[in-house]
Image: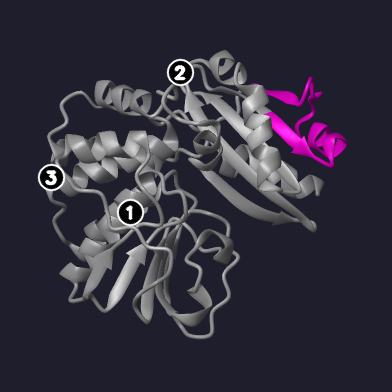
Amino acid sequence: MATTQVFGHKNPDTDTIASAIAASYLLNQQGGDTEAVAQGEPNAETQFVLDYFKLAPLRVITKAETDQVVLVDHNEAAQSVDNLAEVQVTHIYDHHKFNFKNATPLYIVAKPWGSVSTILYYEFKQAQLDVTPQLAGLMASGLISDTLLLKSPTTTEWDRQALPELAALAGIDDINAYGIDMLKAGTDLSTRTDQQLLDGDAKSFDMGGHQFRIGQVNTVDIDAVLARQAGLEAAIKSEGYEDFLFIITDILNSNSKAIYLGDAPEAIEAAFGKKLDHDVIDLPGVVSRKKQVVPPLEKQF
């Protein structure tokens, strides 16, 4: 077994898997001994990417199996392995807000860019190391996923510069067509249970003493997801969270609606300046949980 495991957050998305693989490859090229692993099975979008570039899914873990670990695409303990407090974090590559406490010095690269794949691409350039075509394809896919093909408000000029360069390295001739196919692959929700929809891309947050769970699903038909509202709400109640916000995002039109169950409906309405109607709130123009959902909730709570 490698001496160091590299992994992203629970319920991994495409950028999480791509950045774990990219960070592990980068560190190994620099003399490290690492293994990329995951805290969950790939979602439909990520599986599309793995199949496209002929790569096997990462091995799934719930606890770190090495004394040293590298974190990508997260830094909060609630989103990490169960035994994080028992191991040493040597590196973090992330683009989220920081809530990390450490007892030893470590290597941190944290930038407010659209994806960790973008951050790692520039780490390769700085180290003057080549990115293989497969790896470039993975990183391009992670970038597309987190920025919704450069349409998300989290997108920066660094992302816009990196995507065509990664696409060229990967041999992707039409990045827009590939990106749309990839994003659509993640929106086929017909075979997923209500519980799977809720858990597919969900993160936990502590906001002013409120234990928040915020899930998000991408679709091309918000109404089709809302048609399952009764089942989704039953699944939410069964999980026992104090507050649950489930965001349903139309990736083609860059709009969202959300189902909220919890004890603070007035605060939710105040945070977004909209009214709840049968537990549903309209979120026009909202696509980014990190930039457009979490900040107003944190400010409110």
Horizontally, residue 189 falls left or right of residue 199, namely: left
Query: Could you give the CA–CA distance between mark 1 and mark 2, rounded to whole angstroms?
Result: 25 Å
Horizontally, residue 226 falls left or right of residue 83, namely: right
Q: Total number of numbered labels?
A: 3
Image location (x, y in percent) of residue 113: 45, 48
Image location (x, y in percent) of residue 21: 26, 56
Sequence order check, earlier mark of 3 and 1: 1
Query: Which amino acid, mark 2?
Result: Leu
Q: Nearer the viewer, residue 196 or 120?
A: 196
Secondary structure beneath disc 3? helix
* Res 205 → quadrant: bottom right
Image location (x, y in percent) of residue 82: 51, 68
Image location (x, y in percent) of residue 192: 45, 30
Sequence order check, earlier mark of 2 and 3: 3
Secondary structure beneath disc 1? helix
Query: Which amino acid, mark 3?
Result: Pro
Residue drawn at the location 25% of the way across and 44% of the way down: 138
Residue drawn at the location 72% of the way across and 24% of the way down: 280
Q: Which residue is mark 3?
A: 133
